Image (cartoon, grey):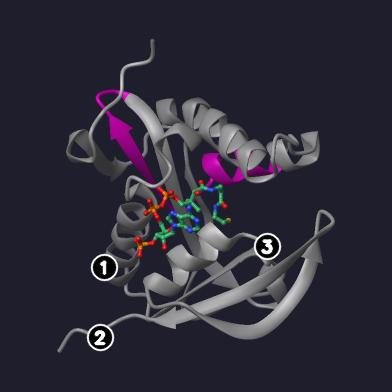
């Protein structure tokens, strides 16, 4: 039987190259669970692996050596990623937790750490996209101060909504 870890045993730390494939496994399991067992398309898996190999910064939830969650931040670019860098804006490209650890507060801890890391890198604002029907994800982000900007679009056949928030400025 799989050993479980309490929240207090899980460490949020910077990801390393050796964490990429375990993180892809978490991404696949979390994405499939969110979609009620429907696995993502191969091109989505390839895109996720590409993001993990080239992040701006990459945080993982490490449960005694097992990767059980991740969060990625990158420099935001204009035109939904195709244009030049947008000064001061961090784009959150992934927040994922292994399904058997959902509801333990790890998503919140990962987002909290991501916001601290983004601020320490000089970002003033943070943005992300999440699925319109992703109630758990939307509650996570709203609880961390994100608000919908009003932008919506379709991606891989799903409606996604844009969220943003500012980061506290140091005095
Ligand atoms: C979204 C996700 C990262 C949340 O991870 P998690 O570890 O379960 O998050 P937490 O335990 O910190 O809970 C986050 C919020 O979810 C909400 N939540 C908890 N249980 C819930 C439930 N049964 N239904 C709906 N929302 C719930 C709570 O509001 C909680 O906020 P709180 O911190 O104010 O209590 C995780 O479910 C996941 O990996 N989902 C698949 C990938 C995904 O959707 N990623 C985000 C969008 S790209």
Badge 2 or badge 1: first in the primary sequence: 1
Label 3 sits on residue:
133
Residue 160, position in %: x, y?
A: 71, 67
> Does any atom of ligand 1 lie closer than 8 Å to the CB of label 3?
no
Q: Residues within 10 Å of mark 2 (few under 14, many from 20)?
A: few
Spot the residue most to the top. Answer: 1
Of residues 36 and 12, the one nearer the viewer is 36
Q: Which mark is residue 86?
A: none
Which numbered disc, 2 or 3, marks the residue that appears first in the sequence?
A: 3
Nearer to us of marks 2 and 3 is 3
The quarter of the displayed image where residue 129 is located = bottom right
Rendered residue at 79%/39% (across/down): 43
Choose between 36 and 16: the one closer to the eye: 36
Residue span colored magenta? 47-65
Crowd around label 1: few <14 · some 14–19 · many ≥20 (10 Å): few
Q: Earlier in the sequence, mark 1 or mark 3?
A: 1
């Amino acid at each position: 039987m799989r050993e479980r870890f309490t929240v207090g045993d899980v460490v949020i730390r910077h990801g390393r190259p050796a964490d990429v494939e375990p993180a892809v496994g978490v991404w696949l399991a979390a994405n499939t669970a969110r979609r009620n067992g429907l696995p993502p398309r191969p091109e989505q898996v390839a895109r996720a692996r590409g993001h993990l190999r080239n992040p701006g910064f990459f945080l993982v939830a490490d449960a005694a050596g097992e990767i059980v969650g991740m969060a990625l931040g990158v420099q935001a670019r204009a035109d939904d990623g195709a244009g030049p860098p947008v000064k001061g804006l961090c784009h959150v490209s992934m927040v994922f937790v292994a399904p058997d650890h959902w509801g333990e507060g790890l998503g919140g801890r990962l987002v909290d750490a991501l916001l601290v890391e983004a601020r320490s890198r000089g970002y003033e604002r943070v943005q992300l996209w999440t699925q319109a029907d992703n109630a758990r994800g939307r509650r996570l982000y709203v609880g961390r101060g994100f608000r919908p900007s009003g932008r919506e679009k379709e991606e891989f056949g799903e409606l996604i909504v844009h969220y943003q928030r500012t980061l506290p400025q140091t005095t």
